[in-house]
Amino acid sequence: DADVTQTPRNRITKTGKRIMLECSQTKGHDRMYWYRQDPGLGLRLIYYSFDVKDINKGEISDGYSVSRQAQAKFSLSLESAIPNQTALYFCATSDPFSEGEGTDTQYFGPGTRLTVL
Amino acid sequence: KQEVTQIPAALSVPEGENLVLNCSFTDSAIYNLQWFRQDPGKGLTSLLLIQSSQREQTSGRLNASLDKSSGRSTLYIAASQPGDSATYLCAVCEETSGSRLTFGEGTQLTVNP
């Protein structure tokens, strides 16, 4: 089973709808992140959480909100979706105290492709 | 604000060739630098992470180097294979940003059989 999972994998919705994207991880990491990827703009950080009670805005948080329900779950919501939120959304996790592959390596989920009409 | 640039944006090579992908960043106060691979429609897979105190990391046919003072990193791929075809992304974590990453736009690599 994948260590970082995202649901749904694909979603088409209409302008003004509320959408929730979910992320779950089995890696036991405290830190979780939400990014969006747009052609020509690379990946940009939306929100990040260093533990259940620590949530922070990233580079492009306007129009988004998040909820950290547990160490393993981090959800991203679009309260009122708009077409320019059409993008590929990624969740990631990391452990700043890990060894092995490298301290604080980020592990990504498979992504959610969101289309807002 | 940290900016990360990757050159070239796209690269096509014949199988077996050795190749170098470049990454540059504007603020040298980084904590680490990571190289990722992304296959079409898929998530990112971490390839190598270099701490700011390190000069290079190796994994199989991949070697990543870091010159923090000049703001540059390279990813060297030896004896390229068609299965190496993917987009390669460089990302830096700044000393003051916690674990947050700033990504480059990537280099799209095609290895032709």
Image: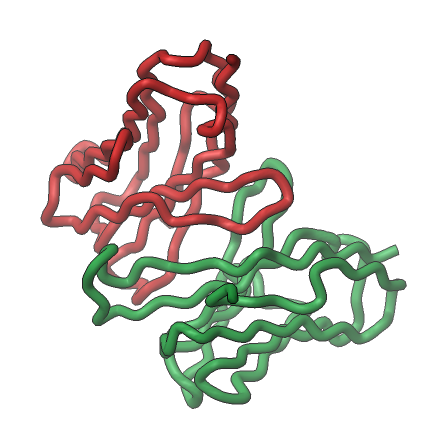
Q: Quadrant of residue A9?
A: bottom right
Q: Nearer the viewer, residue A53 or B37?
A: B37
Residue B72 visible from this viewpoint: no
User: Where residue A25 sits in the image (x, y, percent)?
Assistant: 48, 73
* Residue closest to the far front: A1
User: Where residue A81 sits in the image (x, y, percent)?
Assistant: 79, 66
What is the drawing colour of chain B? red
Judge whether B35 appears above or below A81 on screen.
above
Q: Nearer the viewer, residue B58 or B70?
A: B58
Q: Nearer the viewer, residue A95 or B82?
A: B82
User: Where residue B53 sits in the image (x, y, percent)?
Assistant: 10, 49
Q: Residue at x 37, y 78 (%)?
A: A28
Which of the chains is green? Answer: A
Residue B62 visible from this viewpoint: yes
> Would you say A105 lies left or right of A52 here?
left
Total numbered labels: 0
